[in-house]
Amino acid sequence: MLNRQRNYLVLNYNSSPVVIKTRFESMVIPGGSSREPASLPLSVDEILQVNNEAPFFKCGLLFFEPEFQEDLYEECRIKNWKDILTDKQIEEIVLHPTIEGLQKILSIETEIYFERCYGVYIGLLNANFPIPNNVSKIMRIRRSEFKRKKLKTEIELSPKDIVDSTAAQKELEKTQAQVEELRNLVASMQKQNEELMKVLQAKEKETAENTPPKTRKTTKPKEV
């Protein structure tokens, strides 16, 4: 049961900030991450006003606290809230595609929602993750459909659309192994350098202790 006298956190898991409007003001929810979402406390009435102004909750740009999400989605009259894809789910579909997963993205008929999925895809692409070629092709074609105002896709999936996902997974695992190997090598070199510095410092100290102090030579003045 929601309490209209208290505030509830609205969460932003995306890296980009989101500008929201309530009845009386505009506010910015900073960008967050899947591990540490940014948040903004809002009343139930403010949440309803935000929902009336833009489909941020419907397309997954903003989420609610898990403890209160069911009641808040019901209050906003969003019935299919359990089907809203999170960033993690989108990443999983893009990197490890299945017919069912790709169909979830292709079934999206709201451009702002698909653009969010496309943004996750571009982020993985820019980070050099091995994305199957067919997935990239499907994402580009679907985006061009939206640009042509075609909300319902004409793309029909087949098993061949996911055949290269196994190769992509192997490439990803290979890349991750290489990164881990490089990290271990750097850590090992740093440790060796630290040990070498300790040895050199010990030798310098020992040399300094065993070396007698230098004495200044004095000369007698010549007799006139």
Image (cartoon, rainbow, N blue to C red):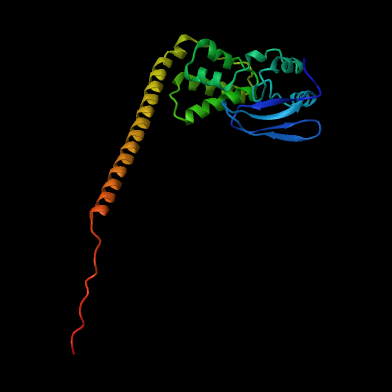
Q: Position of residue 52 (x, y in %)?
A: 77, 24
Above or below: residue 121 compared with residue 80: below
Q: Quadrant of residue 58?
A: top right
**Residue at figure coordinates x 68%, y 13% from the top left:** 80
Q: Position of residue 173 (x, y in %)?
A: 39, 21
Relative to the observer, which residue lies in front, 151 or 5? Answer: 5
Relative to the observer, which residue lies in front, 75 or 206? Answer: 206
> Looking at the rendering, in which quadrant would you find the C terminus?
bottom left
> Looking at the rendering, in which quadrant would you find the N terminus?
top right
Residue located farthest toward the left when viewing the structure as drawn? 223
Left or right placement of residue 182 versus residue 147 in this view? left
Q: How many marks?
A: 0
Q: Position of residue 32 (x, y in %)?
A: 60, 31
Left or right placement of residue 61 versus residue 179 in this view? right
Q: Quadrant of residue 100?
A: top right
**Residue at figure coordinates x 70%, y 26% from the top left:** 9
Relative to the observer, which residue lies in front, 159 or 150? Answer: 159
**Residue at figure coordinates x 25%, y 61% from the top left:** 213
